[in-house]
Amino acid sequence: MKIGRYTVDIIETGRFRLDGGAMFGVVPKTLWEKATPADSANTIAMTTRSLLLRDDVRIILVDTGIGDTGNEKFRSIYSVDRSEHEMVAALAAVGLTPADVTDVILTHLHFDHAGGCVREADGQLELLFPDARHFVQKRHWLWALEPSEKDRASFIAERFLPLHDAGILTLLDEGEEVFTDIDLHVVDGHTFAQQLVRIEGDDASVLYAADLIPMSAHIPAPWVMSYDLQPLVTLREKHAVLERAAEHGDILVFEHDPLVEAATVLRGNRGYTMERSGTLQEMLAASRV
Ligand SMILES: [Zn+2]
């Protein structure tokens, strides 16, 4: 299915689990567990869902997921499960290998978004997309190099520093455009200078909402993660994105929702709710009728 000049595919690269309380901030468990059931350790199921955009020249991947690196302790804390989904197999399913990818847009450098930039080979880390140019906001890169005590566990530098060392990293200034019909929407609530990816077509607009709206359960504006550095900024940024989505029928893609891939939203008296949901392909097909 195409949006404008791009053929769009979803690339699912793995499952993992995070603390349900941390995922929903001040929202009581009695409310969030209806949407996302927790296990005995209070963790909820999550996925890592990348976006693949292809035109005649470029093959652009948005985010690289949690990757296959990390020791047993890391994998067990986050219940990393790649038995059903992983990057190389998911690319193969659409007829590609990692070497075909020309560009990688990283929304931000948290390990569940940029961890898949490297893979383990003979006990060493190597770049998975060594020939691709990788794009990160400059302000975010600088923050990732020296995060605060609150968020430093989310950054694993050995999984993104090799991009810089190999000379395949491009640091962007806010407002800089890189690809035709792709808009990078910079937000500061979750972390500093996260870039969301908007693709504009004639009859549809898709917003890859990354960690501004990671799961469909986060559509209500005040459902903000505890991980966020500036929750009130997130709230404002969510209102802006949701208002536009409700008005224009934008299709939101959820990077971390294991069940709901994409949805449109409605604005009602009690805030924003999900209107229609489905796979991105289904949502794009529906937007054309
Ligand atoms: Zn994040």
Image (cartoon, helix red, strand yellow):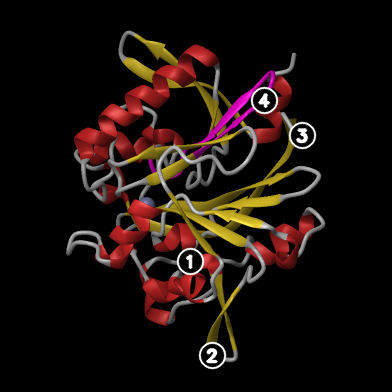
**The magenta stretch spans which residues?**
197-212
Residue 138 picture location, percent across and down: 38, 54
**Which amino acid lies under the numbered mark 3 shown in the image of this protein?**
Met
Residue placed most toward the observer, 276 or 110: 110
Describe the element under mark 2 as helix, strand or loop: loop
The stretch drawn in magenta includes residue 205: yes
Which mark is first along the chain, 4 or 3? 3
Q: Label 3 to label 1, Cα distance in Å?
A: 28 Å
> Which one is in front in this view, the residue at disc 2 or the one at disc 4?
4
Q: Which residue is mark 3?
A: 1
Label 2 neighbourhood size at 10 Å, few (<14), some (14-19), many (20+)?
A: few
Q: Which residue is mark 1?
A: 115
**Which amino acid lies under the numbered mark 2 shown in the image of this protein?**
Gly
| In contact (CB < 8 Å): disc 1 and disc 2 | no
Q: Which residue is mark 2?
A: 123
Q: Label 2 to label 4, Cα distance in Å?
A: 44 Å
Describe the element under mark 3 as helix, strand or loop: loop
Q: Which residue is mark 4?
A: 201
Instruction: From this view, report whether residue 156 is shown above or below residue 182.
Output: below
Label 1 neighbourhood size at 10 Å, few (<14), some (14-19), many (20+)?
A: many
